[in-house]
Amino acid sequence: MFDNLTERLSQSLRNVAGTGKLTEDNIKDTLREVRMALLEADVALSVVKDFVERIRTQALGHEVMQSLSPGQAFVKVVFDELVKTMGDANETLNLHAAPPAVVLMAGLQGAGKTTTVAKLAKFLQERQKKKVLVVSCDVYRPAAIKQLETVANDVGATFFPSHKDQDPVAIAQAAIAEGKLKFFDVVIVDTAGRLHVDAEMMGEIQRLHGAIKPVETLFVVDAMTGQDAANTAKAFNDALPLTGVILTKMDGDARGGAALSVRTITGKPVKFMGIGEKTDALEPFHPDRIAQRILGMGDVLSLVEEVERKIDKEKSEKIAKKLRKGGGFDLEDLLVQFQQMKAMGGMAGFLDKLPGMSGSQMQQAAAGGAPEKMMKQMEAIIQSMTPLERRKPDVINGSRKRRIANGAGVQIQDVNRLLKQHAQMAKMMKKLATPSGITKMLRGLGSLQNKMGGGGMGGMPAGMQMPDVDPKELQKMMGKLPKK
């Protein structure tokens, strides 16, 4: 996410961050590079002009110029303006209405609107404990209704049936009546998309909006369309009273133009972002966290939240308890860690949130799928072992290694490599078995964030520290952090 923009901005700001004194000349050069980085990221020209001008004004101000670390103060200005451009803070859905709260989804065809309906239903059910009903008013696209029924079943949301011969307004009204009758908290209405904005489409969705009066009208748009995403959102906002935007396919957006343009052009907040194809790949849009990721500072807070939500706490606590009592970290435990890592979206998603990792060789390798392939191979090796061998790796001799390698379809050296890596991890786990060990690890991570992973910008500006995390709580919920 934002790989190209992060690389360009990091390079631009790295030079000025370590500067002992800011001058109009070095600010001018840096701002030119920032401007080019944003334009290459397909950020709208009007947004770029305002953004750069605000930075210029503040950078030449007394507070920054007279700062003890003017270079870092300049980076802080860029960070603050990125946050302001994207919306200051996450804006949640306003569901404070007599139930059911009606959410209308609008967007062009191909933006991922129907899939996003299912993702949003899952989000509301799992994180806000809402009872959700979904309905399709798309009577034009072949199999649109069936598609929503399928994805709704996948996430456990209730599907209200509709038919292509029905009127969209009648469908929506019937679904809302059903929602009232059966005490649903939220009704999500999926609407028809078109390949482009047209008068007929706008007329229909305006009629639908007027009839059902939703509390939230969300525009779903493909982030990979860059500046066009913001312009399309504006066209819809001119026709409908939008309350927010959902950016889809953010995981494939290496530029970042849509995220940086939508709020300024439409005046409406980005409320969610789609970060993958899985039904749980929908996250609230936090401008401050996105700004940190754009500047290569990582997003440790989101990482900790993701760990807390996706890690199997029972398995992790079992491992942690065993380690605290002096037990060893065996290959069964390592297998559990691989499974936990997969639940978090794999190594690529993990590294993307670590400070200093954006654009690194490790992240590029992860994006190419190399760690996942290696992880699958190591899983296969462990699964080819007997229960005794998993619990006591020391018993694995030459003949056992040959049998394990044949069973997993690998070479003996692959088995040796796994055993060596396990031994190293077992030593690390022994150190992390106490709260003080976790504390040291977190301090190390904080140090990494401050240094920006060697590819950083000379330190983190004031006010952008690591989030406070209770080491004991982290140990309890994780057992261990995945190996970097």
Image (cartoon, rainbow, N blue to C red):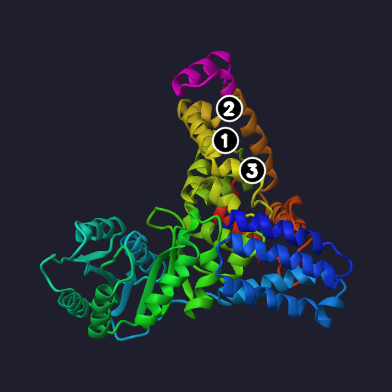
- Rendered view: 192 above or below 61: above
Which residue is under mark 1? 330
Q: Decide: marks 3, 2 in contact (CB < 8 A)?
A: no
Q: Quadrant of residue 160?
A: bottom left
Residue 333 at what x, y percent from top left? 54, 39
Q: Which secondary structure, mark 3?
A: helix
Circle 3 is placed at which residue position? 362
Q: How many marks?
A: 3
Q: CA distance from mark 1 to mark 3?
A: 26 Å
- Height in image: 287 above or below 278? below
Q: Which mark is residue 393?
A: 2
Lower position in the chain sequence, tag 1 or tag 2 = 1
Is residue 25 in sight in this rendering? yes
Quadrant where the image shows the N terminus: bottom right
Task: Residue 398: say if magenta.
Answer: yes
Using residue 356 as the reference point, say whether residue 241 is left or right of it. left
**Label 1: which secondary element:** loop
Q: What amino acid type is highlighted by mark number 1?
A: Asp
- Magenta-colored span: 396-414
Q: Position of residue 21 (x, y in %)?
A: 89, 69
Which sits earlier in the primary sequence, circle 3 or circle 2?
3
Q: Are marks 1 and 2 in contact (CB under 8 Å)?
A: yes
Which residue corresponds to the image point at 25% horizontal and 60% vertical from the top-left?
148
- 57 or 391: which is nearer to us? 57
Label 1 neighbour load within 10 Å: few <14, some 14-19, many 20+: some
Inter-mark Cα distance, 3 to 2: 29 Å
Q: Is residue 285 left or right of residue 463?
A: left
Q: Main secondary structure of the magenta part?
A: helix
Q: Residue furthest left?
A: 165
The amino acid marked with disc number 2 is Pro
